[in-house]
Amino acid sequence: MGIESLDQKIAKQQEKLNQLKAQKQAALAREKAKQKAQERKDDTRRKILLGSYLLKKMEDEAEKQKILAEINEYLTEDRDRKLFGL
């Protein structure tokens, strides 16, 4: 085997290695994006469930006033405050 054919083999193997590294990077990026998407979904679901819980608690007038007082302290944006009539 000549040096030239060995150089060609090395070049082919190097190209294959580069392709495999690129595939690995793409797979890692997909997995990270998938994980981020699931975290966002979980966060949204938590917010919906907490909101539902608070709305249920607000059926009691005493609890409603207590919750609205806490929300009044928490919210800073006028447009958010309007949603709750504050």
Image (cartoon, helix red, strand yellow):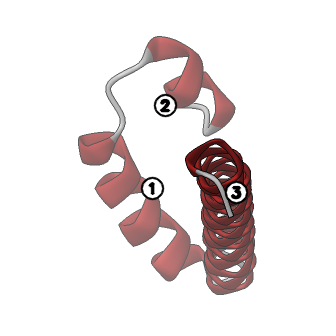
Question: The residue tagged with tag 2: helix, strand or loop?
Answer: loop
- Where does residue 52 sit, x and y in percent of width and height? 75, 77
Residue drawn at 41 percent across, 19 percent down: 77
- Where does residue 44 sit, x and y in percent of width and height? 70, 64
Q: Are marks 3 and 2 in contact (CB under 8 Å)?
A: no
Compare residues 79 and 32 and report the one nearer the observer.
32
Above or below — where is 57 with respect to 8? below
Question: The residue tagged with tag 1: helix, strand or loop?
Answer: helix
Q: Do the residues labelled 2 and 1 touch (CB within 8 Å)?
A: yes
- Where does residue 46 sit, x and y in percent of width and height? 63, 78
Q: Mark 1 Cα within 10 Å, few/some/many (few <14, many 20+)?
A: some
Q: Badge 2 is on which residue?
A: 86
Above or below — where is 58 with respect to 28? below
Quadrant position of the N terminus in the picture? bottom right
Cα distance in 3D space between marks 1 and 3: 73 Å
Question: The residue tagged with tag 3: helix, strand or loop?
Answer: helix
- Where does residue 76 sit, x and y in percent of width and height? 32, 25
Mark 3 and mark 2 lie on one chain; the one further toward the N terminus is: 3
Residue drawn at 75 percent across, 68 percent down: 41
Q: Quadrant of residue 43?
A: bottom right
The label number, if any, that marks residue 14 in the structure image:
none
Q: Name the residue type under label 1.
A: Leu
Q: Badge 3 is on which residue?
A: 9
Residue drawn at 60 percent across, 23 percent down: 82
Depth-wise, is mark 1 or mark 3 nearer the camera?
A: 3
Depth-wise, is mark 3 or mark 2 nearer the camera?
A: 3
Mark 2 and mark 1 lie on one chain; the one further toward the N terminus is: 1
Q: Name the residue type under label 2.
A: Leu
The label number, if any, that marks residue 68 in the structure image:
1
Mark 1 and mark 3 lie on one chain; the one further toward the N terminus is: 3
